[in-house]
Image (cartoon, rainbow, N blue to C red):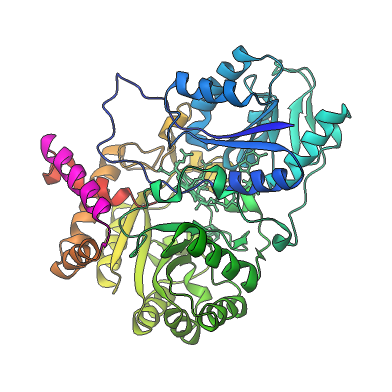
Amino acid sequence: MRVLLIHPADFPDPSRPPPLLPPNQAPPLGLAYIAAFLRAAGHDVAIVDMKHGHHTRAELMDAVRAFGPALVGLGLYTVTVPVAEEISDLIKAWSSEAVIVVGGPHPAGAPEECARNPHFDYAAVGEGEVMMRDLVDALESGSDVRGVAGLWFTEIPDDPESELIVNAPRGWIGELDSLPWPARDLLPPLSSYAMTMFQYREWPATTIYTSRGCPYSCIFCERREILGNKFRVHSADYVVDEMEHLIEEYGIKEIFFYDDTFTLDARRVEAICDTIVARGLKISWNISTHVNTVTRELLMKMNAAGCWQIAYGIETGDPRVMKDIMKGTTVDTVRERIQWTVDAGIEAKGLFMIGHPTDTPETIARTVEFARSLPIASANFKITTPFVGTPLRDMAEDYGVIAKDDYRNYMGDPQEAAFVTNGLTKEFLMGVQRRAYYRFYSRPTRLARIARTMAGRQNLGKWYEGAKIMGRLLRHQTLGPSQGVLPTILEFEH
Ligand code: B12
Ligand code: SF4
């Protein structure tokens, strides 16, 4: 069967000025994993990443018509629900026979809403590789799709009021190594994916996802709905083979491990480091993780194997809020582990959130001062967003106001706040976010570090791109603090 997987992005809107900065991009690995699995099962698969070309309706539909899919899978984020509905309508207008299934973060959190959405035929909850193969098999053989675990849909298609059919839940894939590497060859060239300023030192750089699931219970996080709370891993050999493949096939010099909690299994990380060193790979890499999961020894080993930066989800500097959000750590542990990181020769980056349900102006100020006091090289301060499917979403109404009806605000965007906690205002949150960036980056050492990072760029194209962006910013006269350009640049970090 011909299966088209689409990573939706908004169509250009002439009524809105184009973004001053290109969006953060990374290859849609989830779709690339599904594509590789379907291809190995003998199906014809293509991926359209609308963040890369196929921007207009006409371009998208040219690609759809040229490929002629019988089944279309849309990877759905909350923010992309509105555009996905339009894409679906365009595809149905081209062929009413085409079957549309949505999967990914939004359906994981809001399966009934997606199943009842008349624009889509099926909502897929869980990992897509085996599920899509099972769906293709059922559609090809004409057997009942009720046998496809993980699918939600309505008895009468297009009738949101009809009976909701919820198939058996789909179990998580146990043996991740049984999956082929993501089909990166079906994506636009990897070097065309713009990584953010602090995500790489060497270029070209790309991402790998080496584990799935997270056992922590942070109230704002949807990841457990998306990939489960059981931590599952690719083996060290699988990971390092994939790294080697990226180096040889694509000339990759830096890898960002996009895992949520890369170091949860210390022994596996040690094995990855040992294998990198034993094979003599010359590669620079960085990761994200939870502070609880690192030790001094592990950090030193990681540094020796090429790791130069760790992004820690710190979220707050206030001990009470830290408990309320169930981060499972303390501010003292954060301080200790960041010191260990720096001692091991690795740069630390802090990921903070502003506007937790129990935040007050005082706790937010504490967060900003905490960030400033840590020996971290960079930080971002996101405005808390109550994604559907999270415990935060369930409690948010008791703690403040949710912008319910416009999913376009679900960006964690500096311009919009989808949730405002009691006693605060959207303007306050956005103002405090801007000030947080200024306070954090106003230190000469931190500015010097940004300059160093930029100066370290070996790629002339990247410099040219940076110069173009600066030119655009200057033309728009947006370099003053009131316009918040520095925050915009830094928010650009995901
Ligand atoms: C890498 C990443 C990105 C990358 C790549 C995006 C991509 N499409 O892969 C970039 C940088 C572009 C990005 C951007 C954004 N992201 Co992001 N991102 C992630 C991150 C860290 C990892 C995703 C990943 O690669 N997972 C690994 C693969 C293997 O898993 P997967 O993608 O979930 O796919 C599996 C299943 O979900 C399922 N599946 C996925 N798609 C489909 C489709 C079908 C048809 C089927 C059947 C199944 C299926 O099968 C896949 C394989 O098993 C997640 C955090 C997380 N752990 O989920 C956040 C996350 C998904 N991002 C998030 C957000 C908010 C954003 C942004 C809005 C941020 C912003 N302010 O711009 C944008 C919007 C992107 C867009 N689509 O327009 C939220 C989503 C919450 C939500 N409900 O919307 C998350 C959960 C982080 C968070 N805040 O908690 N992101
Ligand atoms: S540790 Fe990270 S991935 Fe795990 S639940 Fe908390 S925020 Fe989510």
Q: Residue furthest bottom?
A: 297
367 or 227: nearer the viewer: 227
Q: Is residue 470 left or right of residue 123?
A: left
Q: Is residue 240 left or right of residue 304?
A: right
346 or 444: nearer the viewer: 346
Q: Is residue 224 visible?
A: yes
| Position of the N terminus by quadrant | top right
**Would you identify the image quadrant in which residue 125 lies?**
top right
- Residue 470 among those drawn in magenta: yes
**Would you identify the image quadrant in which residue 284 lies?**
bottom left
67 or 438: nearer the viewer: 67
Range drawn in magenta: 457-477
Q: Is residue 401 above or below residue 120?
A: below
Percent across and percent down for residue 436 are 24, 55
Percent across and percent down for residue 351 are 38, 60
Percent across and percent down for residue 386 are 48, 43
Q: Is residue 63 left or right of residue 341?
A: right
**Would you identify the image quadrant in which residue 95 lies?**
top right
Residue at the (50%, 24%) spot, across then down: 60
207 or 164: nearer the viewer: 207
- Residue 425 among those drawn in magenta: no
Q: Is residue 89 above or below residue 452?
A: above
Residue at the (53%, 61%) spot, across then down: 259
Percent across and percent down for residue 475 are 11, 35
Report the number of discs: 0
Residue at the (41%, 34%) spot, across then down: 409
Q: Is residue 347 left or right of residue 36?
A: left
Q: Is residue 185 above or below residue 146?
A: below
Residue at the (20%, 64%) spot, across then down: 455
Please identify the dominant SS of the magenta region.
helix
Q: Is residue 258 visible?
A: no
